Amino acid sequence: MKNTRIASRYARALLDFAIEKDLLESCCDDMKLVSTVCSENRELVKMLQSPIIKTDKKRSIIKEIFGSSINELSLTFLDIIVRKGREADIPEISRQFIEIYKDYKHIYTVHLQTASAAGKEIKTSIEGLLKKAIDGSLEMHEDIDESLIGGFILRWGDNKYDASIKNQLSKLKRSFSKKIYIRNY
């Protein structure tokens, strides 16, 4: 079960402390690693959620897995989370930290959905247009959806721009289904 409120509070605390200690970039890399490991290793997440496994064992497992890969601040932070009994929230805390970090650094995640792989020219022109509208930097993710037929769908934040042929055909179909005509003409 996701507990976003608690996760965001812990993530915010780590962010503030990392800024204070001038380790923000390092902590962000560490939380990306923790998030990746948790998303790729279901057994680790199940172990963290297990009420049967003792806290000391969980702490030693976390230290064994991440001890040589992350900085001391991040490792101490994970240890505190485990000691507080919030180890099941570690995957969500790491994801929340990344989101809060992106917000703090004004990094916007943009999802580009196309029918086929977009060329470098298209990506750079889209990035150029978005940089004019967005104050910050962009992180672009590309998805391929052949059902779009052509064109693209662009999502960032709460915004969506749909320039796909599928959408245009759908609009055309809706306009024809209204059966607007003039009688006796």
Image (spheres, rainbow, N blue to C red):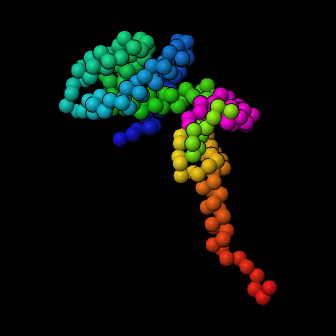
> Is 75 included in the stretch rendered in magenta?
no
Q: Is residue 157 visible?
A: no
Q: Quadrant of residue 72?
A: top left
What residue span does the magenta drawing correspond to? Answer: 122-142
Q: What residue appears at the point 65 percent right and 28 percent down from the top-left corner? A: 137
* Looking at the image, residue 68 lies above or below residue 167: above
Image quarter where the C terminus lies is: bottom right
Residue 62 x %, y %? 31, 20
Q: Nearer the viewer, residue 75 or 126?
A: 126
Residue 26 x %, y %? 50, 15
Q: What residue appears at the point 48 percent right and 19 percent down from the top-left corner? A: 29
Q: Nearer the viewer, residue 53 or 153?
A: 153
Residue 87 x %, y %? 33, 28
Q: What residue appears at the point 63 percent right and 60 percent down from the top-left corner? A: 169
Q: Nearer the viewer, residue 103 or 174?
A: 174
Image quarter where the N terminus lies is: top left
Q: Quadrant of residue 47?
A: top left
Count the numbered circles shown: 0
Q: What residue appears at the point 53 percent right and 46 percent down from the top-left corner? A: 145
Q: Nearer the viewer, residue 130 or 56?
A: 130
Q: Residue furthest left?
A: 52
* Looking at the image, residue 165 lies above or below residue 52: below
Residue 53 x %, y %? 21, 27
Specify whether 146 is left or right of 185.
left
Q: Is residue 39 visible?
A: yes
> Is 129 included in the stretch rendered in magenta?
yes
